[in-house]
Amino acid sequence: MGNREEQRNTMLDDGKKDRKWREKILEEDPGLWTVECLRGRLLAERVASKATKQNAELMENKVCFALFFFF
């Protein structure tokens, strides 16, 4: 269990370093804010799309089970 906690902490630390680096770069070129905003929107859309796909698969499985069970 300690190993997972260490991995999690390492990932969090790396994320903080990455964020600080990005903030520094964005301060130098304000035009990059647009790129970062678009990147964030793309990631959000990917998450939403994945969740929608999972929900659709779950509903499909429920319908197939119901059809199989009742017929």
Image (cartoon, rainbow, N blue to C red):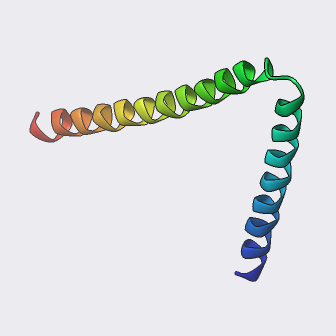
Residue nearest the viewer, comparing 15 with 7:
15
Q: Which of the 4 image quarters holds residue 16?
A: bottom right
Q: Position of residue 29 (x, y in %)?
A: 86, 23
Q: Position of residue 43 (x, y in %)?
A: 62, 30
Residue nearest the viewer, comparing 65 with 40:
40
Residue at the extreme bottom: 2
Q: Is residue 69 left or right of residue 6?
A: left
Where 31 falls versus 8 (above or below)? above
Q: Residue at x 9, y 38 (%)?
A: 70
Residue nearest the viewer, comparing 35 with 68:
35
Q: Position of residue 53 (x, y in %)?
A: 44, 29
Q: Residue at x 82, y 31 (%)?
A: 26
Q: Position of residue 4 (x, y in %)?
A: 73, 72
Quarter holding the N terminus? bottom right
Where 22 falls versus 31 (above or below)? below
Q: Is residue 70 left or right of residue 26?
A: left
Where 59 falls versus 5 (above or below)? above
Q: Residue at x 61, y 24 (%)?
A: 42
